[in-house]
Image (cartoon, helix red, strand yellow):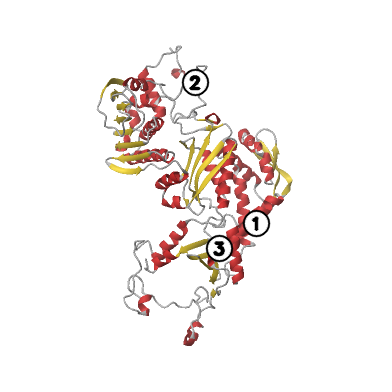
Amino acid sequence: MPDSARLTSRPTIRQLPPDAVNRIAAGEVVERPAAAVKELVENALDAGARAISVTIEGGGLKRLIIEDNGCGMSGPEILMALERHATSKLAPGEDGRIDLLNIHTMGFRGEALPSIASVSRMTLTSKAEGEDASEVFVEAGRIEGPKPAAWTGRGETGTRIEVRDLFHATPARLKFMKSERAETMAVTDAVKRLAMANADVSISLESNGRNVFRYAAHQATPEGDLERLGSIMGREFRENALAITSDRDGVTLTGFAGLPTLNRGNAQYQFLFVNGRPVKDRMLTGVIRAAYQDFLARDRHPMAALFVDCDPELVDVNVHPAKTEVRFRDAGNVRGLIIGTLRHTLAAAGHRASTTVAGYALGKMQGEETRPRDQPLPQPSVWDRSSLFRDSYGSAPPRPQAPASGAGWQSAAPAGGMAEDSARYDAPSARYEPEQQPTPHDFPLGVARAQLHETYVVAQTRDGIVIVDQHAAHERLVYEQMKTQMAADGVRRQALLIPEVVELTEDEAARVLERADELAEMGLEIEAFGAGAVCVRATPALFGTMDAAGLIRDLADDFAEYEEGLALKERFEDVMGNMACAGGAVRAGRRLNGDEMNALLRQMEATPYSGQCNHGRPTYVELKLADIEKLFGRR
């Protein structure tokens, strides 16, 4: 630092004025309109509200209103609530001390109202039971009131808070706000997260006079929770979500997780709630990735909403000013509970695949790009063979020509005088299997009826058909057998002729060495080699020749970001998946007889995760009779 910039005298310590203190607090707690909405809605929930409405204008910067039917406040209580660190949510114990580790409410610091009021124009109207309604106006920390007010709230009691011109007292903060659309989306996301955790509360949002959403209250049951989640995460999630419930060492996990074949290109549909509080925890990304890691491609992400409930003393919710992060006393227990429960739930789902697989297939068959989904295919007015094969534009398709290579086009040979015509084409690839016992009603995946193109098995079910990709299905079956065998026999190691020393930072080396026992179970034998170095003595034999140093560095990054050694596990799955794909799996192009096809179906029904292959693609498509009838315009 240059000498001219150094202090030439001892500075004087001063007490900051209350308005400056409140504006500083507002910068921590209310960094944007969405944060103000979140704090005020949380206050409404803590007040016992069962109906909450949120109204915003200009992304919340121009105006925002939160109305609830909670317990309300009297005039003197409103004034007290506007003081910093004044709250009804913390009470001293018998010894006169307040226990900050035993918090059962959403808010507790008493900073939201004074912080918001210090950077806006706020009107707060409230009515408590047996009291007249009172109103208080606050502008940049200056308070007017309380005074009597007319009550037109949502219930006999409640509170209405109107905030205008947010951050007008701090113009510099306004420069950092995003567009109105971006701020509106942030408010929408914040309210939706709170709505997901409170299915028994009706919540609505209106923006610039337009209704964004209106969620009705549901019973506080798993079915009610799923209805609310489906309203927010979509009908597809509601139809393909697996219920989750488990507990371990005082921690309870509930919620819903989507089937692996229901996935997205990013992780924005993954939600974690701790004691009803929506939190954004980087651990969640790693935990869900670890649970789904051998069911999805690396660039696909499942959908899940998980609720962790535990004694407040087991989690610290006071580690972030906006309460968006928490710290568990035993993070390893929570992580293991989530991973174990998700994997057990997915295994229990067996061969089940999401309904979106059939929907996608039907959309492609109906030409969803050019024709509405509910519009049937054109129907011929008279029985004319040529009209049956006309496309939607009215022109008949050309007669298919045999490829020069003799491969690709395959057709069953016509009967009678068409023999010469059929000679130009390849041998038939559609094989019919006569009906046999047991009937299709006896099995979820039905009974095999045919094999098409030596690749796809067609089975008849109770109320539709199933088309199975024989290679993808058998690939998953072989892969699961390999995992079972490895779990029973353990991972074989190969000792390195010359141990490899990997240079890391001291922190990275410490993180990796802390998990040495866990890594040894997977065949990776390591030990300390001075400060900031790790010595690799053995690697999994399954990997053959490998880049041990690169793997160790990837593990160090995973432990830092996810607290989970994903790199090694994913390497195992990649190697075994490739072995299953290239080795023992039934290849496309192999003809199967009826017994073999039915054996494949029965094994799929008995094998966990068989609804998708090792790369996350579906192994079968199920079409209901109703869906097929829609294709032919019968419905």
Q: Are marks 3 and 1 in contact (CB under 8 Å)?
A: no
Q: Earlier in the sequence, mark 3 or mark 1?
A: 3
Residue sitting at x 34%, y 40%: 204
Per the image, label 1 sits on a secondary structure element best described as helix
Mark drawn on residue 98: 2
Q: Nearer the viewer, mark 1 or mark 2?
A: 2
Disc 3 from disc 1: Cα separation: 22 Å
Q: Earlier in the sequence, mark 1 or mark 2?
A: 2
* Picture quadrant where residue 54 is located: top left
Per the image, label 2 sits on a secondary structure element best described as loop
Q: Locate residue 128, reporting x and y percent.
A: 33, 26
Residue wearing tag 3: 443
Residue 118 seen from this side: no
Q: Amino acid at mark 1?
A: Gln
Q: Nearer the viewer, mark 3 or mark 1?
A: 3
Q: Locate residue 278, reporting x and y percent.
A: 45, 37
Residue 635 seen from this side: yes
In depth, the one of 43 and 488 nearer the eye is 43
Pointer 1 local density, CA inside 10 Å: few below 14, some 14–19, many at least 20? few
Q: Amino acid at mark 2?
A: Ile
In the image as oriented, which residue stretches furthest toward the front?
130
Q: Amino acid at mark 3?
A: Phe
Q: Locate residue 81, reporting x and y percent.
A: 37, 22
Q: Locate residue 98, reporting x and y percent.
A: 49, 21
387 lies left or right of 266: left
Disc 3 from disc 2: Cα separation: 61 Å
Residue wearing tag 1: 481
